[in-house]
């Protein structure tokens, strides 16, 4: 992140925050109930390591339409990996009749502490990930920042009070999703670099998570192999990008073979890497010609 010190959009004029690096004030999450849109916007300001929790509703409508139109032998067990606050999971739930739906993300809660006019946010390990005042939103230095913002960030974040395990916490799950009480919807912490801990699934959704600004190529390969291991003998993996426009590839697996079943707007950037990870020499149908273009 080149500019770890951003303008707080709540304080500064809109014309200024549109032109210069800025962030939504996440402190609204500390004040009790907020509407779904405000909640998602505030959650998008959080950054864990190299990954922002940026999301929004209706983020990949074309892919949802294609997923909903696919033939299913039975209601699928769905795993949504890197689902952020679950806003787009709700869109998928409305489109697909499912047996079970797992909404998963590595970071599903955040802790905070208020000290004077500063609110400090921490991850579950006690690392300060955000410093917020009325005027500024400050992120930790991660490398590549422009001088002098690197030094400013380092100095400000170093002032964070020691994290206490009983600090106030916020569940980073959209209120509309939390309000759903169906017994077949599960919200869980899950690291895509680790094996899936539950039973076999039929459909895996990976939206805006498997890109090389977040992970190395070897880490992406590991995540893809973990997904493949989680699938039933026949199943699907949908990989979606929104940087900046919606693109996706839906892979179908049949008896150990893989084909590109659908390609939306040219397909995901990591399509070839995915085919290699899934075993390209066992590809059932050529990825270059067989996929139905959308």
Image: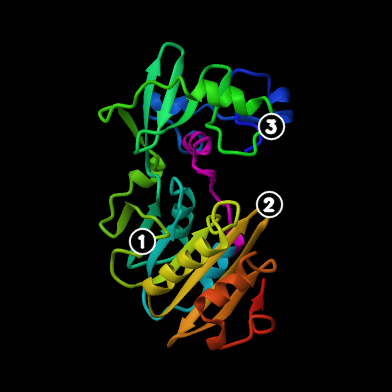
| Residue drawn at x 57%, y 78% as measured from the top left | 261
**Quarter of the image where the N terminus is located:** top right
Local crowd size for mark 2, using a 10 Å CA cut-off: few (<14), some (14–19), many (≥20): few
Left or right: where 167 falls relative to 159:
left
3 or 1: tag closer to the N-terminus: 1
What residue sits right under mark 2 in the picture?
244
3 or 2: tag closer to the N-terminus: 3
116 relative to 286, above or below: above
Where residue 247 sits, quadrant-wise, is bottom right
Q: Secondary structure at mark 1?
A: strand
1 or 2: tag closer to the N-terminus: 1
Q: Position of residue 141 (x, y in %)?
A: 56, 33
Local crowd size for mark 3, using a 10 Å CA cut-off: few (<14), some (14–19), many (≥20): few
Local crowd size for mark 1, using a 10 Å CA cut-off: few (<14), some (14–19), many (≥20): many
Q: Along the line of sight, which residue is nearer the eye, 100 or 247? A: 247
Q: Along the line of sight, which residue is nearer the eye, 167 or 247? A: 167
Contact? badges 1 and 2 (CB < 8 Å): no
What residue sits right under mark 3 in the picture?
146
């Amino acid at each position: 992140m080149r500019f770890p010190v951003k303008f707080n959009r709540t304080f500064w004029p809109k014309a200024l925050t549109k032109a210069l690096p800025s962030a939504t004030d996440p402190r609204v999450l500390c004040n009790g109930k907020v509407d779904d849109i405000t909640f998602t916007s505030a959650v998008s300001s959080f950054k864990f390591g190299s990954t922002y929790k940026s999301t929004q509703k209706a983020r990949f409508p074309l892919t949802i339409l294609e997923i909903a139109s696919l033939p299913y032998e039975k209601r699928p067990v769905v795993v949504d990996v890197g689902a952020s606050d679950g806003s787009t999971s709700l869109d998928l739930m409305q489109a697909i009749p499912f047996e079970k739906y797992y909404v998963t993300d590595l970071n599903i809660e955040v802790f905070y502490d208020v000290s004077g006019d500063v609110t400090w946010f921490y991850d579950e390990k006690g690392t300060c990930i955000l410093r917020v005042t009325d005027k500024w939103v400050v992120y930790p230095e991660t490398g590549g920042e422009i001088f002098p913002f690197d030094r400013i960030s380092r100095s400000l974040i170093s002032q964070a009070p020691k994290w206490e395990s009983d600090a106030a916490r916020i569940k980073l799950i959209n209120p509309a999703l939390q309000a759903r009480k169906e017994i077949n919807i599960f919200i869980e912490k899950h690291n895509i670099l680790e094996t899936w801990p539950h039973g076999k699934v039929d459909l895996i959704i990976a939206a805006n998570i498997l890109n090389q600004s977040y992970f190395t190529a070897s880490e992406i390969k590991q995540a893809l192999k973990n997904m493949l291991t989680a699938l039933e003998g026949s199943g699907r993996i949908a990989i979606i990008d929104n940087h900046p426009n919606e693109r996706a590839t839906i892979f179908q697996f049949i008896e150990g073979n893989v084909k590109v079943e659908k390609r939306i707007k040219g397909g995901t950037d990591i399509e070839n890497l995915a085919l290699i990870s899934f075993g390209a020499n066992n590809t059932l149908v050529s990825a270059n010609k067989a996929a139905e273009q959308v």
